[in-house]
Amino acid sequence: MKYLIPLLLLTSPALADPADVVAIDARHSSDGWRFDVTLEHGDTGWDDYADGWRVELADGTIVGERPLAHPHENEQPFTRSTSGVVIPDGTVEVFIRARTNVDGWAEDTTPYLLPE
């Protein structure tokens, strides 16, 4: 019986980890901004994977979002894009927030200075 508790600890599920934003690129065109965001996450399949990212203004206003429809356990890190993001004139910095299907939206954001 004294070995039961350590054995149970070894078989407990690991705590989920947030997805990391490892690269951001953005370009402006006549129909808005295009964002290419690279995420890295320990996707394990449908049970735990990075399932999206979004573009926010400094006040938390969401101006763009990119859902991710499936796990990328064999493609890490990976880049996905979204276009047509409308950012108010005069904005010089936006923030990218990643999401996982286990933890939801990350507490932390990654700042990004928009190119001129």
Image (cartoon, helix red, strand yellow):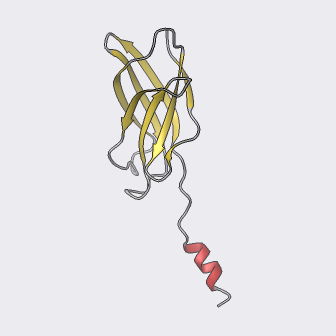
**Quarter of the N terminus within the rendering:** bottom right
Residue pushed farthest bottom? 1
Q: Position of residue 85 (x, y in %)?
A: 38, 21
Q: Give the answer, above or below, for where 20 lies relative to 86.
A: below
Q: Residue at x 41, y 59 (%)?
A: 47
Kindly identify the residue that appears in the image at 44 percent across and 36 percent down.
Answer: 53
Is the residue 35 above or below the residue 109 in the image? above
Residue 13 in percent (x, y) is at 53, 66
Q: Is residue 81 left or right of residue 110?
A: left
Up/down of 13 relative to 58, above or below: below
Hey, which quadrant is residue 32 in on the image? top left
Q: Which residue occupies the foreground of this view, 88 or 24? A: 88
The answer to which image quadrant residue 2 occupies is bottom right
Q: Depth check: give the residue in front, 25 or 46.
A: 46
Residue 88 spot, x, y in % from top left: 45, 13
| Total tally of numbered discs in the picture | 0
Residue name at image x 65 percent, y 86 percent: 3
How far from the left and from the top, in percent, is residue 52? 41, 40
Q: Is residue 90 above or below residue 59?
A: above
